[in-house]
Amino acid sequence: MTDLRPFIAGLPKAELHVHHVGSASPRIVAELAARHPDSLVPTDPEALADYFTFTDFAHFIDVYLSVVDLVRTPEDVRLLTYEVARDMARQNIRYAELTITPYSSTRRGIDEKAFMEAIEDARTAAESDLGVILRWCFDIPGEAGLEAAEETARLAVDLRPEGLVSFGLGGPEVGVPRPQFKPYFDRAIAAGLHSVPHAGETTGPQTIWDALTELRAERVGHGTSAPRDPALLAHLAEHRIALEVCPTSNIATRAVADIDRHPIREMVAAGVLVTVNSDDPPMFGTDLNTEYEVAARLLELDERGVAALARNAVEASFLDPAGKSRIAAEIDAYTDRWLAS
């Protein structure tokens, strides 16, 4: 097969499933750990590679939360957010919907208004300095229960920052049923936010159905188990409900046993709108370019096929129509130039 890495590196892209704290590079994690020496997180970037080796999904959550604990001040929030955008710019990511868990920060004592100001200051600077458009998804940490859901909904609706476009639900799925969060999603949707819960990553198709019927999901985070239910796949395809697929993440958290058995092929074959994403890239030793390379191999794509994947993300995004048209045109123009040369 053609080496697609150079093409992918320059391809304009959008990313829809990537976590705020989970995007902290080893350099930034080490800097934050040095600021807060009471943490157990290593300050040596090389040691972080071992620290970010997970035995299962529960272990991943434990490690993730230890990194969350490093973000303790508005200055930490602003630094992290801007540096994430800088890493995105290096990959030619033009637009990203960054999943943020404000409850994790406000419960650790960061003033809620200062938190909003920090992410918004970073967002506007990232767009002007780096050409990266950021939008936010505020998500409920499912493991923290309904108290966290209430707080997240309040922050999203009452203190809604300008960049906020959607409302989500993350964390473990086992033992955290989706229907209990319906009132909070109803409140967010009534306020004009889009519904984008995680579902079907480490549980079966019923979790995805619950996200669709109870939480009115417009996109589904992961949806890894969807191919186990042909009727579900057909429903997703018919209604153009996108799946936010994160191949390397699914292997790292043991949600999928082997990359060559990843269900992305079945999703695409069924006509589902599939987007490719990196989830928590430094923690999984990946980035969005690498995820496109993995998807291209699994799906046996050429340059135009990869470009079509990039357009999927633009289509499924919550960017305004003019912004979508602009990035889609960039993708097409880049692809045409590449093939012509």
Image (tube, grey):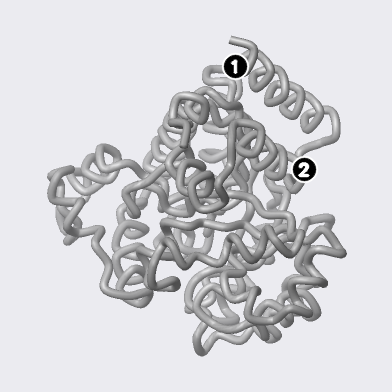
Residue 252 x/y as whole percent: 35, 63
Q: Which mark is residue 338?
A: 1
Q: Secondary structure at mark 1?
A: helix
Q: Nearer the viewer, residue 251 or 284?
A: 251
Q: Nearer the viewer, residue 36 or 335?
A: 335
Q: Which mark is residue 210?
A: none
The answer to whether 43 appears left or right of 232 in the picture is: left
Q: Looking at the image, is 32 positioned above or below residue 266?
A: above
Q: Residue furthest front?
A: 1
Report how far apart the C-alphas of labels 1 and 2 lie in the structure.
22 Å
Q: Residues within 10 Å of mark 2 (few under 14, many from 20)?
A: some
Q: Nearer the viewer, residue 5 or 289?
A: 5
Disc 2 residue type? Answer: Glu
Give the labeled residue for mark 2.
315
Q: Residue at x 47, y 46 (%)?
A: 291
Disc 1 residue type? Answer: Trp
Query: Where on the picture, by quarter, is residue 77?
Result: top left
Q: Residue at x 64, y 74 (%)?
A: 227
Residue 313 x/y as whole percent: 68, 44
Query: Where on the picture, by quarter, is residue 93?
Result: top right
Q: Residue furthest bottom?
A: 175
Q: Secondary structure at mark 2?
A: helix
